[in-house]
Amino acid sequence: MADIVSKKKRSQMMAGIKGKNTKPEVAIRKALFNKGYRYRLHKKNLPGKPDLVLAKYNTVIFIHGCFWHRHDCHLFKWPSTRPEFWKDKINGNKTRDLKHLKELRELKWRVLVIWECAWKGKYKRPLDEITMLTEKFLKSDLEEFQIENVNKCPDYHSAFGK
């Protein structure tokens, strides 16, 4: 299937996709800051350059896009054009994510991943719920956790022991 926009326009569109300071990232940062949490951004000396680093809680937070990180949810769909390129690109991202998670765990960091589908789509959660779940993780003893859309998430009450 041919692309519906020119190569130049597609290049401009792809260049406009931000990797840092995305709307969901800024929203969770503001919500946590307003609740008194302090953090560092995109620490280059940590595997994967986490979006947020809360040293006091020995926790890193990644805010992942479901497409770019191949999340198994309703927002992910393999592109129909250039399938081999996208398969290599997206699978490479997924492999790198798993490597960074392993490295962070070896360094004794706790890891929270907040998925894009928690923020948008037909099964999204309200920001205050995402913030509450983030706070529960920070106060818990869990080493890793993921916040996903309402259709995919486990029973959070049992995950946090309440």
Image (cartoon, rainbow, N blue to C red):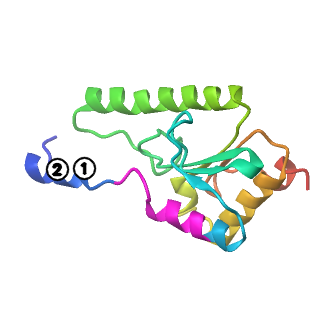
In what element is the residue under mark 2?
A: helix
Give the camera-side residue of 74 and 38: 38
10 Å crowding of disc 1: few (<14), some (14-19), many (20+): few
Q: Is residue 7 above or below residue 82?
A: below
* Contact, mark 1 vs mark 2 (Cβ under 8 Å): yes
Seen at 84% across and 50% down, the residue is: 140
Q: Quadrant of residue 99?
A: top right
Q: Position of residue 93 (x, y in %)?
A: 43, 32
Task: Specify the label residue 47 is tagged with.
Answer: none
Q: Position of residue 55 (x, y in %)?
A: 70, 48
Seen at 27% across and 39% down, the residue is: 80
Q: Position of residue 63 (x, y in %)?
A: 54, 51
Q: Residue furthest right?
A: 162
The residue type indicated by label 2 comes to Arg
Seen at 59% across and 53% down, the residue is: 40
Identify residue for label 2.
Answer: 10
Give the camera-side residue of 97 and 148: 97
* Residue 68 visible in this rendered orientation of the protein: yes
148 to the left or right of 133: left
10 Å crowding of disc 2: few (<14), some (14-19), many (20+): few
Separation of disc 1 and disc 2 at Cα?
6 Å
Seen at 67% across and 61% down, the residue is: 38
Q: Is residue 132 above or below residue 83?
A: below
Identify residue for label 1.
Answer: 14
The magenta stretch spans residue 26: yes
113 to the left or right of 70: right
- Quarter of the image where the C terminus is located: bottom right
* Magenta stretch, residue numbers: 18-30
Give the camera-side residue of 42 and 72: 42
Q: Position of residue 15 (x, y in %)?
A: 24, 50
- Quarter of the image where the N terminus is located: top left
